Amino acid sequence: MKRILLSIPHMGGLEESYVHQAFASNWLSTVGPNITAFEEAFDNWIGLPSVALGSCTAAIHLGLRLLGVGRGDEVVCSTLTFVAGCNPVRYLGAEPIFVDSEYATWNLDPNKLEDALSDRAKRNKLPRALVVVHLYGQCADMDPILWLCKQYEVPVLEDAAEAAGSIYKGRPAGSLGDIGTFSFNGNKIITTTGGGMLVSRNLAWVEKARFWSQQARDPGIAYEHSEMGYNYRMSNVLAGIGRGQMEVLELRVKQRRAVAFRYRDALQDLPGITLMPQASYGLHTNWLSCFLVDEAQFGASRDELIHALDRDDVDSRPVWKPIHMQPLYAGCKRFGGAVAEDLFRRGICLPSSSSLSKEEQLHVINCIRRVAGEQELSQMDLATSSV
Ligand SMILES: Cc1ncc(COP(=O)(O)O)c(C=O)c1O
């Protein structure tokens, strides 16, 4: 058996034909029919206008600029996330303020957000924006978050990099705030090898992002520029992969959820290892299957488990190291942080590919069961689990 990786691309079948069309028509550029078709498919699926970009990091950068973030501003960010979600704050000369997670969702704690906003309001220094992440495929509890941000007139950027296909109270992640951003990095639920999308119900903003992403070239035949631009547009070749991937997004959500619930069922008799909570308000895609390890009950620490899996040729990784613990962001203001630190210390992400075979998953499960000193399962046991 080959090494089992954390999260690998899973093509639906049509991607290659769209990429071939790009070659056949010689649209090997950042313009072309695949880009238009990919954006159209995304617009139809999310119900908002969108612009395809080179990465989600680029989308967040453009999104924050659209929200007016600039030098000397403050931006509130979820602390438990990947660093790419808040680096663009610094690209723009602003400073992040970090807010802790809640145990119920692992996402931004609305109570801590209220502490942050009321503190900044008292100091007459309201943040220019909030970047709220939807972690590992689960939406943050957006109703109280949006309500608070409305009270304080703080616009909201949803970092839905990990949450394509996730739902909050019937609405797709990324469609709830002022701006939504998505990633199509190679490890995501759907991929273009690398890529991103920005969406907003404000069409003028989407058009502005498209303009900036193509070096902000003014209309006319001369290469005239009045605004700062970037080379952030998606390529027509990669958009061909995205077109094909859009056709299987719903299936990939089902498959990722099945992987997570198969782990949950196969490990349920083991004390001290529990699946990330599944908030009742939405659909958690379980882009990554994440578990919390309680060393005293489980009999091994999270790190010991990662090392044991590694010895058995299985990739796993700790839950994100909170950004307020990163040397790069040392000294930044924060509200809470102990919950995110605890989730980081005890959390593990297991192999979660939608193409993970039952045989491969059984290998991972039995490695975990051996570490816990429990009897291994058979293919039959897995076949009769509830998924
Ligand atoms: C939460 C989060 N935000 C932002 C990003 C950045 O996305 P990209 O790699 O497409 O720039 C990622 C992942 O890569 C992510 O997980």
Image (cartoon, rainbow, N blue to C red):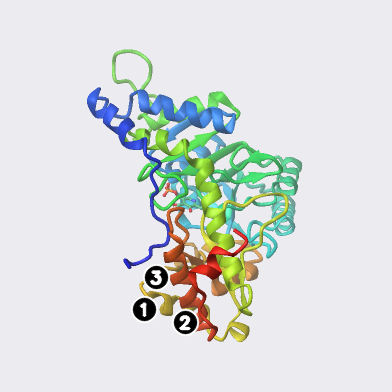
Nearer the observer, disc 2 or disc 3?
3
Local crowd size for mark 2, using a 10 Å CA cut-off: few (<14), some (14–19), many (≥20): few
Viewer-proximal residue, 68 or 304? 304
Q: Residue 241 location, x and y as percent?
A: 36, 37
Residue type of the residue flagged with mark 1: Arg
Gap in angstroms between the C-alphas marked 1 and 3: 7 Å
Is the C-beta separation of discs 1 and 3 under 8 Å?
A: no
Residue 23 lies left or right of residue 275; in this view the side is: left
Q: Residue 366 location, x and y as percent?
A: 48, 76
Residue 53 lies left or right of residue 237; in this view the side is: right
Local crowd size for mark 1, using a 10 Å CA cut-off: few (<14), some (14–19), many (≥20): few
Q: Is residue 336 above or below residue 369?
A: above
- Secondary structure beneath disc 2? helix
Q: Quadrant of the N terminus?
A: bottom left
Q: Quadrant of the C terminus?
A: bottom right
Which residue is pictured at 67% across the width and 42% down the height?
Answer: 154
Gap in angstroms between the C-alphas marked 1 and 2: 11 Å
The residue wearing badge 1 is 311
User: Which of the labelled discs sits on residue 387, or is there none?
Assistant: none
Q: Is residue 295 above or below residue 250?
A: below
Viewer-proximal residue, 220 or 43? 43
- Secondary structure beneath disc 3? loop
Residue type of the residue flagged with mark 3: Val
The residue wearing badge 3 is 314
Q: Is residue 312 above or below residue 52?
A: below
User: Which of the labelled discs sits on residue 304, or is there none?
Assistant: 2
- Secondary structure beneath disc 1? helix
Which residue is pictured at 75% across the width and 48% down the height?
Answer: 144
Gap in angstroms between the C-alphas marked 2 and 3: 13 Å
Identify the mark nearer the N-term, 1 or 2.
2
Q: Is residue 361 visible?
A: yes
